Amino acid sequence: YRNFKMEEKTIWKNLKEMPISARIGLAIVVVNLLGGAFAPLIAPYGETFTAGDFWEPVSSKFLLGTDQLGRDMLSRLLYGARNTISIALITTFLAFSSGMILGSLAVVKGGWVDQIFSRVVDILMAFPTLILALIVISVMGTNTLVLVLTIALIASTRVFRLSRALAMDVEVMEFVEAARLRGEGPTWIIAREIIPNILPPLVAEFGLRFCFVFLFISSLSFLGLGLQPPTADWGSMVRENADAISYGYLIPLFPAAAIAILTVGVNLVVDHLLNKAAGNVHGDM
């Protein structure tokens, strides 16, 4: 219980020390996460329910109007937050964990393992990300599993590069050499010595990778290759209602604003983490 109270005090202390920009960013992230998690409870209508006429203006019945099929835009935004953010988080976690583990393994094993991993990553990074994704999705088909695996593969290359660079600095430390002399294997060294020491600098990278994945999914959905209808997705909602602008309706601006606001919020938090990490580094020096 005492440890729990100490951790609670530490959390509140960190929150109080956060600058106003980071607090705003954290509030944006929390609101989006809560809105997506409790979408079925707080949304006025169902995800695919046709509640009115197409492109109805903002009113007391439809707080953000309706889309091209007469579905409530507020409800679609809430369900879109759940779908888009959850898939982006799963994809980012998959890319982050695989890139971090493979980057550490390349350093610990060295030799031909490092060469093969590094050259494969170089080949993947030589392709423009959007073109590579379009090629894979066009060949494998458009479904959620292919979308997640494709974007995770693309994002993991950047995480691999960073993890490998950080692991190279840790791998030459005395405690890693001591572990080798004790007869510890590569798995033990990676799990107990490498990853715990490179994880703090990678926390901010997780936020940056999430932004990349989130925007990438929205971009593919806008092109019609992301989440498929009738699933609510912010990128596809912009594409489906783009013609409304020609008639003076602001309907497509709502999902576009949601994408921009969440991206800005995550970046505000990431900037704070980067500044805090840089301060710790200077303090240690």
Image (spheres, rainbow, N blue to C red):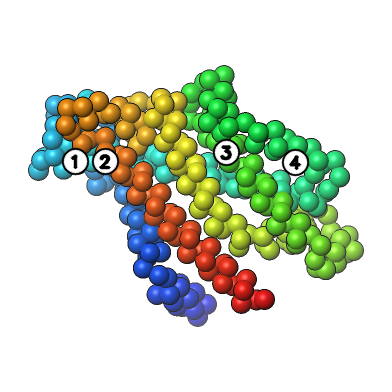
Q: Are marks 1 and 3 in contact (CB under 8 Å)?
A: no
* SS at badge 1: loop
Identify the residue position indicated by label 3 in the image.
Answer: 152
Give whichever of discs 3 and 4 has the lower sequence position. 4
Type of amino acid under label 4: Ser
Q: Are marks 2 and 1 in contact (CB under 8 Å)?
A: yes
Q: Tell me which amino acid carries mark 1.
A: Leu
Is residue 2 shown above or below 117?
below
Residue located beneath label 1 in the image: 64
Residues marked 2 and 4 touching at CB (< 8 Å): no
Q: Residues within 10 Å of mark 4 (few under 14, many from 20)?
A: some
Report how far apart the C-alphas of labels 2 and 4 lie in the structure: 42 Å
Name the quadrant containing residue 190.
bottom right
Which circle's residue, 2 or 1, is located before the other in the chain? Answer: 1
Find disc 2 in the rendering and name its residue: 254
Tell me the CA gap for discs 1 and 4.
48 Å
Can residue 30 be seen here? The reply is: no
State which mark lies toward you, 3 or 4: 4
The reply to whether callout 1 and callout 4 are in contact (CB within 8 Å) is no
- Graded by Cα atoms within 10 Å as few (under 14), some (14 to 19) or many (20 or more), the crowding at tag 1 reads many
Q: Residue at x 43, y 75 (%)?
A: 17
Helix, strand or loop under label 2: helix
Residue 203 visible (yes or no): yes
Question: Which quadrant: the C terminus?
Answer: bottom right
Find disc 4 in the rendering and name its residue: 118
The amino acid beneath tag 2 is Phe
Give the mark nearest the N terminus, 1 or 4.
1
